Image (spheres, rainbow, N blue to C red):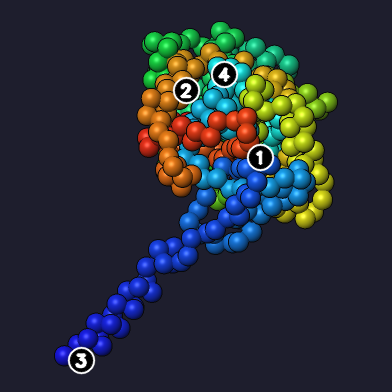
Amino acid sequence: MNRNLTALSLMTLLLAACIPGCLFSSEVTYSQCSDDDNCLKIAFEVKEEYQNTDENPQKLADRLGELMDQEVEIYPVSSAAATIEALRFGNADIGFLDGGAAWLSWNEYGLEVAAAEQKADGRAYYHAVAWVHKDSDMAQASMEGNITEALTLMKGKISCHTSALGSSGMLLPMGYLINNSYMDVVGDANEIDSLHDTVTNHFSEDSSIPDSGTPYYRYIGSLRCLAEHTLGDATDYISFAKDPTVPDYCGDDPQDWCFEGDFTSTEDFYPIGGYKENGEVNTPFGKAPSHPVMYNPDVFTAAEVQALQDAFTTMSSNDADLAILDDVLSTPGMTIIDTESHLGSYGDAIGDVPGITAYFNSKISKTSSSSSSSDTPWGLIVPSVLIVAGGAVFYFVRVNGTKTEEAAPSTHEEVLEEAPIEE
């Protein structure tokens, strides 16, 4: 019997060793504010544990506290939808949102931009681009300066998109083409489902609108769809993506598929919507904005906005702070920018995508109708997604004597599962 007990104990220990450490490791702890009247709460979609301690958002909180001369506390969040609701009703002061969610919050609720994360090349945006083969009639027309003809010639081609609702891979170029009468909406203009039929009617039934996990998903997949052009000549294909896509995937360290078909070098990829020799963009599909810091001007004062901007400016100007931004936010720096400059062209383009405003609003409405409060911030941890494009989704909450202490609305639903998600 004793031998059986010993064997059982050993087996238990072996099984325990095979179970992921997060089930047994201690919870990540965060500093608590001692003075609620001088406390900046950073609501963050936290992990139970961090493989790299530098990823812990407490690191960002501590540094912002030093720069803004106040205590800072990590406050877990449930979703980006809850961020918008929190900003609307004054439960949060500022929040990071994806471009689509940010545009909605500005367009519908008057929220504004204080700053924005930078992309890998230092810009706070990407240009939406239609990549085509340089020998295509579209490229030839564009090279001759006839952009109108180039866009008209896209009709009937096989289009490759990043996802069903990707920003630069779908919403921006489709919105621009619809808004400028190059393509007609098929179906109910107020229903997001009409976008699929609109695309396949204008381009081709064989157009690629990929699901997550498939070979032609995201920027890399859209470009691969063009490079492989399995259903026709390369000159009959279009890849809707961002302007750095070709150098990113077929440049110095090219993917295996880059030059297997009719493409022999990066020079064979031509960007309609890319740059002329003088640096001008030759087709105004629009910019896909990075994650901006949104705030409610009725809640967050101009002085507070300036203090935050000053802190981010400092953090973006020295190596030690840049390391924090990279570790915690996966961004190489922050750009101080205003709402119109960051979201204006984006909103102008996607506003005409069939059903897009109603679609975003319906998801936010679901969050509002199913909102609930919790006695503790930990009650708000729910695996829910509004719009994801890389990086963490979080918002900052200020607690003081003049603000409500009611918990921000939250939801247990998965929202906007097909929202802009490209990288």
The residue where tag 4 is placed is 109
Q: Amino acid at mark 2?
A: Phe
Of tags 3 and 1, which is closer to the observer? 1
The residue where tag 2 is placed is 360
Q: Kindly state the secondary structure of the residue where label 1 is placed.
A: helix
Counting residues from the start of the chain, the first of labels 4 and 2 encountered is 4
Q: Residue sitting at 44 percent across and 42 percent down?
A: 375
Counting residues from the start of the chain, the first of labels 3 and 4 encountered is 3
State the image coordinates of residue 228 (x, y, percent, origin top left).
50, 39
Asked if 26 appears above or below 224 in the picture, the reply is: below
Q: Is residue 12 left or right of residue 313?
A: left
Q: Nearer the viewer, residue 96 or 72?
A: 72
As drawn, the label of residue 190 is none
Q: Residue sitting at 75 percent across and 26 percent down?
A: 302
State which quarter of the image contains the C terminus. Answer: top right
Q: Label 2 to label 3, Cα distance in Å? A: 64 Å
Crowding at mark 2 (Cα within 10 Å: few <14, some 14-19, many 20+): many
Q: Amino acid at mark 4?
A: Tyr
State which quarter of the image contains the N terminus. Answer: bottom left
Counting residues from the start of the chain, the first of labels 1 and 2 encountered is 1
Of tags 1 and 2, which is closer to the observer? 1
Q: Nearer the viewer, residue 16 or 241?
A: 16
**Residue 303 figure quarter:** top right
Q: Nearer the viewer, residue 137 or 279?
A: 279
As drawn, the label of residue 37 is 1
State the image coordinates of residue 74 (x, y, percent, origin top left).
58, 48
Q: Is residue 229 left or right of residue 32?
A: left
Q: Amino acid at mark 3?
A: Asn
Q: Residue sitting at 21 percent across and 91 percent down?
A: 3
As drawn, the label of residue 2 is 3
Q: Label 1 to label 2, Cα distance in Å? A: 35 Å
Of tags 4 and 1, which is closer to the observer? 1
